[in-house]
């Protein structure tokens, strides 16, 4: 898109998300239980960690997409995503609520990844439970080392 920095979510990818979200039954609470995984965080990840309380740590120069192309706005509009997890920064492991959606980063899991050598490897684990009566999903998460 002519801007320096990390790759952005393209318009065709956002259209794909909108198409899939429109296909979900609006009257089924389970359709609000989506989790999105991406490499580089959204700009909203940076707003969250820089201006709101989070659990975990922001360690390096945490990176986000160079241009805000509107994916988070579409997620809010459709209400189908509850959690957005990014992993493009291998030493940060924060998460928190931003506008009703949980945004988070994983942590380095391998030996050859970048980031400070003092950061202990680990992986973000998600434990999901869905109430069978209401369809509401609960997410518990932690870093397993």
Image (tube, grey):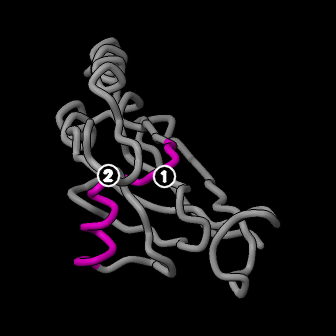
Side of 61 where 113 appears, left or right: right
Q: Which residues are magenta?
A: 37-52
Q: Choose top left, top right, bottom left or bottom right for residue 73.
A: top left
Q: Secondary structure at mark 1?
A: strand
In the image shown, does 69 or 79 lie closer to the viewer?
69
Q: Which residue is mark 2?
A: 4
Q: Choose top left, top right, bottom left or bottom right for residue 1.
A: top left
Q: Choose top left, top right, bottom left or bottom right for residue 98.
A: bottom left
In the image shown, does 47 or 143 lie closer to the viewer?
47
Q: Position of residue 50 (x, y in %)?
A: 28, 77
Question: Residue at image x 72%, y 82%?
Answer: 117
Question: Residue at image x 22%, y 78%?
Answer: 51
Q: Secondary structure at mark 2?
A: loop
Q: Can you say whether 67 is above or below 70 in the image?
A: below
Q: Can you say whether 50 is above or below 46 in the image?
A: below
Q: Which mark, by number, is residue 77?
A: none
The quadrant of the image that shows the C terminus is bottom right
Side of 69 where 95 appears, left or right: right
In the image shown, does 41 or 123 lie closer to the viewer?
41
Assess disc 1: are there few (<14), some (14-19) or many (≥20) residues with their C-alpha within 10 Å of its C-alpha: many
Question: Residue at image x 25%, y 55%?
Answer: 100
Question: Residue at image x 46%, y 45%?
Answer: 137
The alpha-carbon separation of the residues under discs 2 and 1 comes to: 23 Å
Q: Position of residue 104 (x, y in %)?
A: 45, 61
Residue extending farthest to the bottom is 118
In the image, residue 45 lies in the stretch drawn in magenta: yes
Q: Can you say whether 100 is above or below 59 in the image?
A: above
Badge count:
2
Q: Which mark, by number, is residue 85?
A: 1
Q: Position of residue 41 (x, y in %)?
A: 41, 54
In the image shown, does 80 or 12 lie closer to the viewer?
12
Q: Position of residue 62 (x, y in %)?
A: 44, 69
């Amino acid at each position: 898109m002519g801007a320096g920095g990390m790759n952005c979510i393209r318009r065709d990818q956002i259209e794909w998300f909108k198409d899939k979200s429109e296909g979900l039954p609006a009257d089924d609470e389970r359709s609000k239980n989506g989790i999105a995984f991406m490499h580089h965080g959204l700009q909203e990840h940076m707003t969250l960690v820089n201006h709101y309380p989070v659990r975990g740590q922001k360690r390096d120069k945490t990176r986000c997409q160079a241009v805000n192309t509107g994916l988070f706005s579409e997620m809010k509009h459709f209400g189908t995503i509850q959690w957005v997890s990014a992993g493009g920064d291998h030493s940060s492991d924060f998460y928190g609520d931003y506008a009703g959606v949980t945004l988070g980063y994983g942590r380095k899991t391998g030996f050859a990844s970048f980031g400070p050598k003092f950061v202990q490897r680990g992986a973000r684990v998600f434990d999901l439970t869905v109430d069978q009566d209401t369809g509401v999903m609960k997410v518990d998460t932690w870093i397993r080392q």
